Image (cartoon, coloured by chain):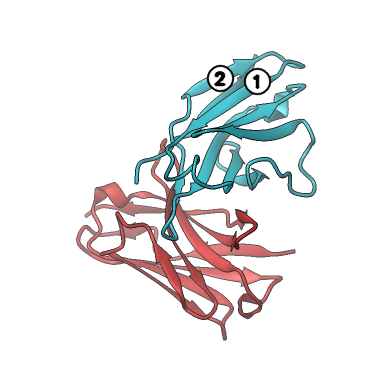
Chain colours: A cyan, B red
Amino acid sequence: QSALTQPASVSGSPGQSITISCTGTSSDVGGYNYVSWYQQHPGKAPKLMIYDVSKRPSGVSNRFSGSKSGNTASLTISGLQAEDEADYYCCSYAGSSTWVFGGGTKLTVL
Amino acid sequence: QVQLQESGPGLVKPSETLSLTCAVSGYSISSGYYWGWIRQPPGKGLEWIGSIYHSGSTYYNPSLKSRVTISVDTSKNQFSLKLSSVTAADTAVYYCARHMTTVTVDWFDPWGQGTLVTVSS
């Protein structure tokens, strides 16, 4: 069970859109529609942003959206804002009642 | 509003057992959901440790399974983590979280604030 692969960092200017990828295998990301995304500000607990690939919890801005193609899931943030600067983690069900997280991506808002 | 709070020693000696408790408020553990533990080594990513149902049914990360025990105390509305034979590699912030997992939905939310556990002599 290996960690899902995310880019170490991405950046964008306010108002722009960015996409963070999360690559796994057919045994996790590609095999199930159970990918979730978490936002973590420095020193804070992670916060659920997207679940089941593309569903948004109540209270999460519609600027956040999720998708999946094959073994890669993606989180897109549109209309970037300064408060979006944080670390983002993906998570996938990996079969046999196990779950695996990605290594995390640091988003910098320029 | 569901809230979770981790507690336990912040310093554990190598080879000893790490023990943490997560107190849940605003929701009765007996009412459902799984409850999970996730850790984050300093400056690194998240790692799922394991999850438990109120009935006591458990799921563990295969890489930690031989050292991990998660238990639940519904009378105190809390659940606990024990990790044995710890080494410096187990130094991390440990989070507890409500874990919703069914045939239709899957997520961890909300999370506790986390507690740093350092393994050192």
Q: Residue at x 63, y 74 (%)?
A: B32
The residue type indicated by label 1 comes to Ile
Q: Is residue A45 visible?
A: no
Give the mark, 2 or 1, whose residue is nearer the N terminus: 2
Q: CB under 8 Å between callouts 2 and 1?
A: yes
Left of A99 or right of it: where is B99? right
Query: Which residue bears the numbered disc 1?
Result: A18
Q: Which mark is residue A10?
A: 2
Left of A93 or right of it: where is A64? right
Left of B104 or right of it: where is B116? left
Image quadrant where residue A79 sits: top right
Disc 1 element: strand
Q: Chain of mark 1?
A: A
Image spot of residue B88 (x, y percent): 25, 49
Tally of marks: 2
* Figure check: B66 above or below A6: below
Disc 2 element: strand
Few, some or many C-alpha atoms within 10 Å of disc 2 (few <14, some 14-19, many ≥20)?
Answer: some
The residue type indicated by label 2 comes to Val
Q: Which mark is residue A75?
A: none
